[in-house]
Image: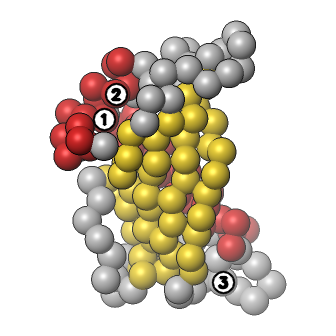
């Protein structure tokens, strides 16, 4: 059973997202997770645009466990949220499930590192970003 994450969106599997076996190509689970995480970031007021945002946000590590499959035109619920905030990094958890049955398809996490645009070195999470995340997920204040 999927856990409660603070944000979700539905994606309909396109034919071009499937592989030769007719199910969602494994890497596209990660694409969906990334796209919905970006929606969440924008929903809480973070400027995720690399041109206008105060810093870059690099994904430096990811994990994904696959437990089900879906195919063309299946409706997939993608849930996401932060599970840890560090000084210059944050951990995002994601889950994908079939929209109609709730069957868990995949779950994992990725680590975001906040990066100075000029030096391309890690930098502290911008205060406005941290505040926006904590406003939506106050339980992270202790992390």
- The kind of secondary structure element at disc 3 is loop
| Residue 84 seen from this side | yes
Mark pair 3, 1: CA separation = 34 Å
| Callout 2–callout 1 Cβ contact below 8 Å | yes
Label number found at residue 96: none
Classify 10 Å Cα crowding around label 1: few (below 14), some (14-19), many (20 and above). many
Q: Residue at x 27, y 25 (%)?
A: 131
Q: Quadrant of residue 143?
A: top left
Q: Is residue 113 left or right of residue 102?
A: right
Q: How many marks?
A: 3
Q: Position of residue 32 (x, y in %)?
A: 55, 59
Q: Position of residue 61 (x, y in %)?
A: 64, 52
Q: Looking at this view, is 24 or 133 the one in front? A: 133
Q: Looking at this view, is 142 or 25 the one in front? A: 142
> Please, is residue 100 above or below residue 91 in the view?
below
> Please, is residue 38 above or below residue 56 in the view?
below
Classify 10 Å Cα crowding around label 3: few (below 14), some (14-19), many (20 and above). some
Label number found at residue 130: 2
- Frontmost of labels 3 and 2 is 2
Tell me which numbered mark, 3 or 2, is placed earlier along the sequence: 3
| Residue 10 seen from this side | no
- The kind of secondary structure element at disc 2 is helix
Q: Looking at this view, is 51 or 117 the one in front? A: 117
- The kind of secondary structure element at disc 1 is helix
Label number found at residue 133: 1
Q: Is residue 77 left or right of residue 63?
A: left
Which residue is tagged 3?
23
Q: Residue at x 62, y 43 (%)?
A: 59
Q: Residue at x 63, y 36 (%)?
A: 58
């Amino acid at each position: 059973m999927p856990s409660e994450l603070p944000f979700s969106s539905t994606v309909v599997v396109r034919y071009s997202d499937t592989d030769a076996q007719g199910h969602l190509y494994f890497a596209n689970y990660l694409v969906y997770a990334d796209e919905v995480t970006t929606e969440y970031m924008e929903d809480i007021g973070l400027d995720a645009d690399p041109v206008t945002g105060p810093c870059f946000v690099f994904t430096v590590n990811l994990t994904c466990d696959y437990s089900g499959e879906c195919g063309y035109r299946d409706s997939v619920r993608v849930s996401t949220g932060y599970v840890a905030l560090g000084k210059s990094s944050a951990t995002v958890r994601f889950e994908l499930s079939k929209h109609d049955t709730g069957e868990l398809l995949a779950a994992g996490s990725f680590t975001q590192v906040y990066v100075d645009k000029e030096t391309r070195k890690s930098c502290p999470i911008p205060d406005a970003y941290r505040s926006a995340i904590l406003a939506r997920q106050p339980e992270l204040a202790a992390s």
